[in-house]
Image (tube, rainbow, N blue to C red):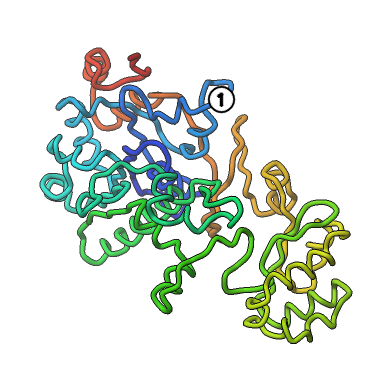
Amino acid sequence: MPGALEGLRVIDLSRVLGGPYCGQMLADHGAEVIKIEPPQGDETRLWGPPFDQEGISAYFAGINRNKRKIALDLSKPEGRAVLLKLLEQTDVLIDNFKTGTMEKWGIGYADTLSKKFPRLVHARVSGFGADGPMGGFPGYDAMVQASSGLVSVNGSADGGPVRIGVPVVDLSTGMNACIGILMALYERNRSGKGQFIDATLYDSAIALHQPHAPNYFSAGLKPKLVGNSHGSLAPYSNFPTKGRNIVVGAGNDGQFRKLCQMLGKPELADDPRFKTNKDRVAHKPELEAELRALTKDRDGESFATELMQNGVPSGAVLEVPDVMEHPHTKHRNMVWEKDGYRNVGNPVKLSRTPAGVRSKPGKFGTDTKAVLAEAGYSVAEIDTLIATGIALTEIRKA
């Protein structure tokens, strides 16, 4: 079944995570995405172990399915000439080169690409953007988590600030770039013109500061490290059981009253210290101590399910293998498999044009010859491009 983006052609020049994740989101929904790697390959091909039987790292495999794989040496004028030829039939370009690289090569958006290809949508993923006090600085997820304040709000008073355990900044930037691309394509239907999309890790990280930023702007509040608790809501924390810990969040007085009933202590809901959320937040240590005493002898997974069935948000603290094999994960089609490939599925579910896995992540340069032939290059021309190192089918050794 054709995906929602069938007929859309994307060239993905990006490497590592944010840009490739954006490209994969588009590819999962039917876009033809051509990933152009440099001669040494996307560095995440080497980020392991683990590696699969074909030598592809799990890291690379997680964000590069459904893409055609070619390689060009864009540092050479001949390589850039091939890219320009490919862009003649392309709707979207994604890159995450160091700021100024494409401009130095004479293929920047403002001076060149927007003029040669006025309908092109060009998305750039970068750490901090091209200008300003931090413009042009390199950015990896952990570093931007630190410089954007995310690390400062994650952790406990005892343990200190810690990095969030998944690359949330890279992934959210990839999602934001994807949203920007779709917005620009929609606007192109009216104007007939493409535009440049500036997606930065820094901006994406700052946009995640909910509710810390509103609290600061409203009352000048500086967030404190609260561990598993919530600064404005109680109870909303991690509680011990005789099995797995559970996280329970009572977002209103009704949910709190139901929680107290199910814990066998309904009178707790009428305690003057805990009658309203404002009261509960003010007396959070006492409240959490009361609840810990009531949960510690429960079976975590079964009690979390029972709470959910009765309208109290909760969840057992599962580990990654538990989640990937969970029946609801399977029901939601969040694990995709094809020809030995197995990985997380696409979270965006469309009713008539669902996403799907058409091809697993391929080896370096597997589609170089085919893509060049489709662009109009003859066999002799392709052979010359490969012989001179402009196009590649194998990783260039250092």
168 and 60: which is toward the camera:
168
Number of numbered discs visible in the structure rendering: 1
Q: Quick one: label 1, few (<14), some, or many (20+) residues within 10 Å? A: some
Residue 384 sits in quarter = top left
Q: Amino acid at mark 1?
A: Phe
Picture coordinates of residue 5, whole percent (x, y): 41, 52
- When the figure is inspected, residue 161 is found, relative to residue 105, above or below; the finding is below
Q: Residue at x 40, y 52 (%)?
A: 173
Direction from residue 27 to residue 283 in the image, left or right: right
Residue 375 x/y as whole percent: 26, 32
From this view, report whether residue 96 is shown above or below residue 68: below
Look at the numbered disc 1 and give the secondary structure of its residue: loop
Left or right: 123, with 341 as reference point: left
Q: Is residue 292 left or right of residue 146?
A: right
Residue underneath mark 1: 51
- Quarter holding the C terminus? top left
Residue 191: % across, % down: 21, 65
287 or 204: nearer the viewer: 287
Kindly identify the residue that appears in the image at 59 percent across and 44 percent down.
344
Q: Nearer the viewer, residue 275 or 384?
A: 275
Q: Splitting the image into 4 quarters, where does residue 69 fall?
A: top left
Q: Position of residue 394 (x, y in %)?
A: 37, 17
